[in-house]
Amino acid sequence: MLEAALSPGIFAFVIVPLLIFCARVCDMSLDTIRVIFMSKGIQYLPPFIGFFEVIIWLVAIGQVMNNLTNFVCYIAYGGGFATGTFVGMAIEEKLSLGLTSVRIITKEDPSELMQFLRSHNYGVTSIDGEGGTGRVKMVFTIIKRQDLRHVVSIIKDFHPNAFYSIEEVKSVAEGVFPERRSHRIFRWLDSLSSGPKGR
């Protein structure tokens, strides 16, 4: 019906490529999120996401196969793939799921930094170390990823010249984390990505 209402040129070179592009954006966004959820140890959402992902992909590839002589469809397919990957990463960044380990190495006394972090309900551990230029203090903390920007700003305020590294953490048994008000779905997703809790 839609094809009959439009001229063949507009339908073939505008409508069909646009549908392919949108379908690829959707399925690649879901694919990116699914892979990220799997890497964070979330077990239940990836199969659910994959179900819809593959159906959308079948729609997109079906349209390409029906229009093999239309080069615009190929461009739309590739553009949707690239855009969908970017959109999926942006969505995952907004969700900020999972845990992150922050390791701080400083020559200065980190007592005030540790006290400040603990006052904000961040769990902190410190040990003595030996660096290339002498003795150093190593401070470790595992935080929720959504708190990373806040913690990094605290580190820079107290020790602007300190070396710090950030690593992803798949799961923890126990931990001290600040309480945050968030939507129920975000709390549920975060509990899935944090792994089993210790008794």
Image (cartoon, helix red, strand yellow):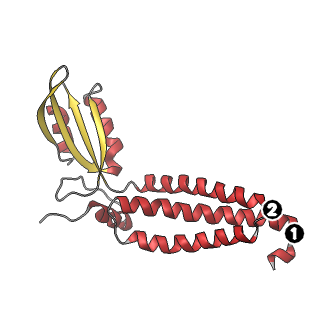
Q: Is residue 151 visible?
A: no
In the figure, 111 relative to 58: above or below? Answer: above
* x and y percentages locating residue 32 in the rendered image: 48, 59
Kind of residue at disc 2:
Phe
Residue displayed at 28% across by 56% down: 170
Q: Which mark is residue 76?
A: none
Q: Nearer the viewer, residue 70 or 126?
A: 70
In the displayed structure image, the side of residue 57 where residue 107 appears, left or right: left
Residue displayed at 82% across by 68% down: 11
- Considering the image in quadrants, where does the N terminus appear? bottom right
Secondary structure of the residue carrying numbered label 1: helix
Q: Quadrant of residue 71?
A: bottom right
Q: Give the number of marks.
A: 2
* x and y percentages locating residue 179 in the rendered image: 25, 56
Mark 2 neighbour density, 10 Å: few (under 14) some (14–19) many (20 or more):
some
- Considering the image in quadrants, where does the C terminus appear? bottom left
Q: Quadrant of residue 196?
A: bottom left
Q: Which residue is mark 1?
A: 8
Q: CA distance from mark 2 to mark 1?
A: 8 Å
In the displayed structure image, the side of residue 182 where residue 143 appears, left or right: left
Q: Which residue is mark 2?
A: 13
Mark 2–mark 1 contact, CB under 8 Å? no
* x and y percentages locating residue 70 in the rendered image: 79, 62
Q: Is residue 47 visible?
A: yes
Mark 1 neighbour density, 10 Å: few (under 14) some (14–19) many (20 or more):
few
Q: Residue furthest top?
A: 133
Secondary structure of the residue carrying numbered label 2: helix
In the displayed structure image, the side of residue 13 where residue 138 appears, left or right: left
Kind of residue at disc 1:
Pro
